[in-house]
Image (cartoon, grey):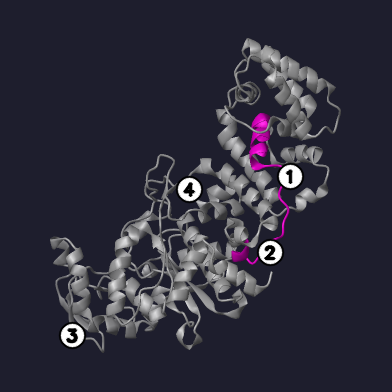
C-alpha cells in the first residue's frame, strides 16, 4: 500500500487514535507555524515510582502521535512530532509513600520540593526525585518509547521558566479571577497562584503573596517564622500552583496535545482559561476514564488495590498489556489479575487477523497501532499454535510441576514444528502461563466426582480415546468428544452440560478449553489417566 493510500484511509478511520489526531489537523490546517514539530506531552509526579498509569498515558499519547504522522504523510524519523515526558519534581512532598525505604528521612523533609529531598534509596542519585526520574526513564526505555525527558526543577532552577513566571505575575489578578470562584471560602483566604519557597526551611509555602515587580519576579510574603520576606520567584525560588503550573508549561513549551484522566477534568478547564490569559492556547487532548479494581472501586495507590506493571508482566505479556490499555479509553475498565488471560489471547487473535484484513479494518485493529508505535511491521509475525488459555489449563492440571520447561515439553509433542519458538513473545507467554497457573489457578482447582450418567459418558470417551492413533488432530478428537456428548443414553440436555462435566471432573474448574485441543496437547495416555482418576472417585 502506498503512503498516500494509507493517509487517505486514516483520515476516515473511526479508530480513536486517528479521531484524536484529527483534532491536530483542525488545530493546524496548514501545519504548525514555522514548520515546528507538533509537541505531545505526558506528565509524571515523581513522589512515587512509575506505575501502570504512567505506562498507559505514554502509550496512548504515542499512539495518537503515530496516528497524526500517518495523517500528515510523515514518518517518525521525519521529525514532524516530539513527545516530552515531563516530571513535576518541583512539587512539595505532601505525604510519605508506603513503598519507599527510610520513611523517617522523608517525613523530616515533608513540604520540600521533591528534587531537594535526600535520596532514601541508597542509590547514587542526588535526591528523591532524581532517583525516581531515573526509574521513569528506565521504565520508558524498557518499553521502547521515543521521548524527551524534561524536569520541572531543571527548568525552574536554570531560569528557563523565568520569562513564563514573569508572565504569570503580570497577569496575577486575571488568574486569581479564574481560580478564586472555584475555591471554598477558607481556601480563598490563603490561595496564591505562586508558591514561594521558604528561605529558612526550604518548604514550598501555601501563603498569600503580594506582587512587587513582575519584570524582576519580586514578591512579598510572610515566612513560616512570621517574618516578612521579599524575594524573586526566579531561579527556583518558587513554583506555581498545579493548575497555573500546567497552563504555564503548555504556553512555555508550546504543548499541542496532552491527555489526562477523568479526575483532572476541572483542572483542564481552569488551566485552559489560564493558558489563554497567558497568551497561549490550551492543547488538544482526550480525557480518559480511570481504571477500577475487581470490585469496581477506583484504584488508589494508598489502598494498594491496583495492579503493577511488574505484576502484569509476571502473569501476562507486554503485548497484552498494550492491547488492554488500547481498547475503549473513554470507558471505565477493571484492572486486576483476572483480566490478563483474556487480554493475552485476544491480542493474538487480533494479530492473527491483521495480515488478511482490508486496510480500513487494519486501521481499526489495536495491533496495527501497537506494532506501529514500536516501529514494527504491521503485517509480520505468526500467531502461537497454543493459546494462553490452553496453556493455563495444562499448567493447572500439572499443578506444582507446572514449570515453563514442562509446558514446553508438552508443546513440542503437540506441535512438531520448531518454528513455533520463533513466534515473538512465545517463550514469555509460556513463562507467564506457568506463573499464573501456579499462583491463581492451581490453588482454586477442586475436582468433583462424576454423576452416574457422567461416569458412563467418561467410560465411553475413554474407550474411544483408546482407539485413537498417534498424531490424531485436535479437531478429530474434538469431534469424537462432541459425538459422545450428543448420545441420548447419557442424558445431557445440551453439549454445554457435557463439557461442564468434563471441566469439573477432569480439570477441577467450571470452565475450560476446547477438549480436543487439550487432549491433543496433554496427550492421549495422560488424558486417559485423568479419566481413570475421575472414575475412581465415584
Write down the residue under mark 2.
Answer: 377
- Of discs 1 and 4, which sits in the foreground? 1
Image position, residue 374 (x, y; %): 61, 64
* CA neighbours of label 1 inside 10 A, class few (<14), some (14 to 19), many (20+): some
- Of discs 1 and 3, which sits in the foreground? 1
- Magenta range is 371-400
- Of discs 2 and 4, which sits in the foreground? 2
> In which image quadrant can residue 359 be found?
bottom right
Q: Which mark is residue 385?
A: 1
> Residue at the spot x=39%, y=74% of the render?
153
- Of discs 4 and 3, which sits in the foreground? 4
Image position, residue 537 (x, y; %): 65, 13
* CA neighbours of label 2 inside 10 A, class few (<14), some (14 to 19), many (20+): few
Write down the residue under mark 4.
Answer: 307
> In which image quadrant can residue 191 be found?
bottom left
Quadrant where the C terminus is found in the figure: top right
Is residue 397 inside the magenta stretch? yes
- Distance from Cα at disc 3 to Cα at disc 2: 58 Å
Amino acid at each position: 500500500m502506498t503512503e498516500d493510500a494509507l493517509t487517505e484511509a486514516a483520515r476516515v478511520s473511526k479508530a480513536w487514535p486517528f479521531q484524536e489526531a484529527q483534532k491536530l489537523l483542525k488545530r493546524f490546517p496548514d501545519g504548525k507555524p514555522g514548520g515546528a514539530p507538533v509537541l505531545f506531552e505526558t506528565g509524571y509526579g515523581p513522589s512515587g515510582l512509575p506505575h501502570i498509569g504512567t505506562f498507559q498515558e505514554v502509550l496512548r499519547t504515542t499512539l495518537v502521535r503515530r496516528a497524526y504522522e500517518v495523517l500528515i504523510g510523515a514518518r517518525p524519523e521525519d521529525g514532524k512530532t516530539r513527545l516530552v515526558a515531563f516530571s513535576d519534581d518541583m512539587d512539595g512532598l505532601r505525604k510519605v509513600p508506603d513503598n519507599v525505604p527510610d520513611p523517617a528521612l522523608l517525613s523530616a523533609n515533608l513540604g520540600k520540593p521533591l528534587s531537594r529531598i535526600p535520596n532514601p534509596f541508597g542509590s547514587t542519585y542526588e535526591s528523591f526525585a532524581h532517583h525516581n526520574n531515573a526509574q521513569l526513564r528506565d521504565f520508558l526505555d524498557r518499553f521502547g518509547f521515543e521521548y524527551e525527558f524534561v524536569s520541572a526543577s531543571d527548568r525552574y532552577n536554570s531560569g528557563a521558566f523565568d520569562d513564563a513566571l514573569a508572565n504569570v505575575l503580570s497577569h496575577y489578578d486575571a488568574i486569581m479571577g479564574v481560580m478564586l470562584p472555584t475555591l471554598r471560602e477558607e481556601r480563598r483566604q490563603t490561595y496564591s497562584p505562586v508558591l514561594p519557597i521558604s528561605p529558612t526551611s526550604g518548604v514550598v509555602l501555601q501563603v498569600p503573596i503580594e506582587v512587587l515587580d513582575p519584570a524582576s519576579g519580586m514578591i512579598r510574603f510572610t515566612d513560616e517564622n512570621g517574618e516578612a520576606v521579599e524575594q524573586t520567584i526566579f531561579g527556583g525560588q518558587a513554583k506555581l500552583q498545579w493548575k497555573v503550573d500546567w497552563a504555564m508549561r503548555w504556553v512555555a513549551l508550546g504543548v499541542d496535545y496532552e491527555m489526562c484522566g477523568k479526575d483532572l477534568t476541572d483542572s483542564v478547564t481552569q488551566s485552559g482559561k489560564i493558558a489563554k490569559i497567558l497568551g497561549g492556547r490550551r492543547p488538544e487532548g482526550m480525557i480518559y476514564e480511570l481504571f477500577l479494581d475487581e470490585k469496581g472501586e477506583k484504584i488508589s495507590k494508598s489502598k494498594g488495590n491496583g495492579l503493577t506493571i511488574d505484576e502484569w508482566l509476571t502473569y501476562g505479556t507486554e503485548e497484552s498489556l498494550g492491547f488492554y490499555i488500547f481498547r475503549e479509553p473513554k470507558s471505565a475498565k477493571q484492572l486486576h489479575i483476572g483480566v490478563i488471560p483474556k487480554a493475552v489471547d485476544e491480542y493474538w487473535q487480533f494479530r492473527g487477523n491483521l495480515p488478511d484484513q482490508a486496510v480500513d479494518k487494519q486501521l481499526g485493529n489495536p495491533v496495527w497501532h501497537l506494532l506501529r508505535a514500536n516501529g514494527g511491521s504491521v503485517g509480520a509475525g505468526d500467531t502461537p499454535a497454543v493459546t494462553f488459555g490452553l496453556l493455563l489449563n495444562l499448567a493447572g492440571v500439572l499443578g506444582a510441576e507446572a514449570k515453563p520447561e514442562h509446558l514446553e515439553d508438552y508443546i513440542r509433542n503437540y506441535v512438531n514444528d520448531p518454528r513455533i519458538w520463533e513466534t515473538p513473545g512465545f517463550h514469555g507467554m509460556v513463562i507467564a502461563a506457568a506463573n499464573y497457573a501456579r499462583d491463581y489457578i492451581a490453588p482454586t482447582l477442586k475436582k468433583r466426582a462424576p454423576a452416574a450418567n457422567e461416569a458412563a459418558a467418561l467410560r465411553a470417551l475413554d474407550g474411544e480415546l483408546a482407539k485413537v492413533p498417534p498424531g490424531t488432530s485436535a479437531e478429530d478428537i474434538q469431534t469424537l468428544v462432541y459425538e459422545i456428548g450428543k448420545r441420548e443414553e447419557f442424558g445431557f440436555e445440551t453439549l454445554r452440560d457435557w463439557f461442564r462435566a468434563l471441566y469439573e471432573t477432569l480439570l477441577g474448574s467450571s470452565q475450560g478449553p476446547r477438549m480436543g485441543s487439550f487432549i491433543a496437547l496433554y496427550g492421549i495416555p495422560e488424558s486417559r489417566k485423568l479419566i481413570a482418576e475421575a472414575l475412581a472417585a465415584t
